[in-house]
Amino acid sequence: MKDYIAYLEEFVTDNRKQIFKTVLNNRTRYFTVALEDLYQMHNVSAVVRSADVFGLQDVHIVQKKYDPKLSHAIAKGAEKWLDIRRYPNTKTAIENLRQKGYQIVATTPHTNDVNLQDFDISKPSAFFFGVEKDGLSQAVMDQADVFLKIPMYGFTESLNISVAAALIMRDVSERLRQSDINWQLTAAEKEQIYLQWLEKSIKSIDLIKKKYFENL
């Protein structure tokens, strides 16, 4: 892989390569977000954009009823740099995330909820956000390890989902970076993502790849 990366680097400017490495050093998989059956393209795209801004590498999307498309105009191309993982149902998503070591966090008012500022960041967590009208499904509520809410002091009792996701990601990612938790990607993860980003940055990448592997 290292030889292939070195080959691709010949087609990318030094500035571009440095930006990739700087961003990778701030990427994390310690926290992630999962969107359960959102139907508004705007909200899905806005959450993806926020995930990129706050350094979360993965976004998980459950598609039971809806197949949300990402808006490049809203996401600002963030989807190009993230790993978007899609699931046919909530059960599969939760099982996959648990296997990866995440606790399941339901972002919804609940009798046993935790205020955002009191949320314990010591465990890798997957933050679930539900469909705009009905909220999270009972499947998530039954499986959740933590119920998380954003304190509100006005007449309005809810936030747009993309706003709520951005507030939560900013809070937990900032606290994570100020902690002594090992939150960064592994060297192997950085190398794999760096390779993906190089390939996505090069025009005519298919022809360039073909030429490289034909000459091996």
Image (cartoon, rainbow, N blue to C red):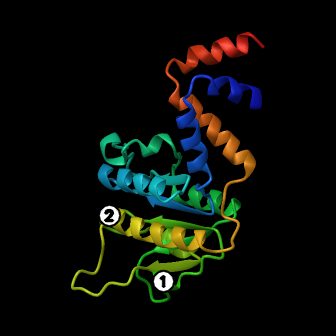
Dividing the picture into quarters, in which one does residue 185 lie?
bottom right
Q: Is residue 1 at all visible to an observer of this figure?
A: no
Is residue 44 among what the camera can see?
Answer: yes
Q: Residue at x 53, y 36 (%)?
A: 16
For image coordinates 51% across by 67% down, the residue present is 127
**Residue 134 point in image, percent of width and height:** 33, 68
Category of crowding for the residue at label 2, using alpha-carbon neighbours closer than 10 angstroms: few (below 14), some (14–19), many (at least 20): some
Q: Quadrant of residue 102?
A: bottom right
Which numbered circle lies on residue 44? Answer: none
153 to 212, vertically: above or below? below
Q: Which mark is residue 132?
A: 2
Position of 86 with respect to 98 (left or right) is left
Point out residue 51 in the picture as x, y percentages from the top left corner: 47, 56
Outermost residue on the front side: it is 14
The amino acid marked with disc number 2 is: Glu
At a point 56% along the width and 52% down the height, the residue shown is 57
Q: If you read the primary sequence from the N terminus, does the residue marked by circle 1 or circle 2 appear first?
A: 1
Which of 20/157 is in front?
20
Quick one: quadrant of the N terminus? top right
> Could you tell me residue 124's position as x and y percent?
64, 68
Q: Which residue is mark 1?
A: 117
Along the line of sight, the residue nearer the viewer: 180 or 214 = 180
Residue sitting farthest toward the left: 155
Instruction: Residue type at mark 1: give it.
Output: Gln
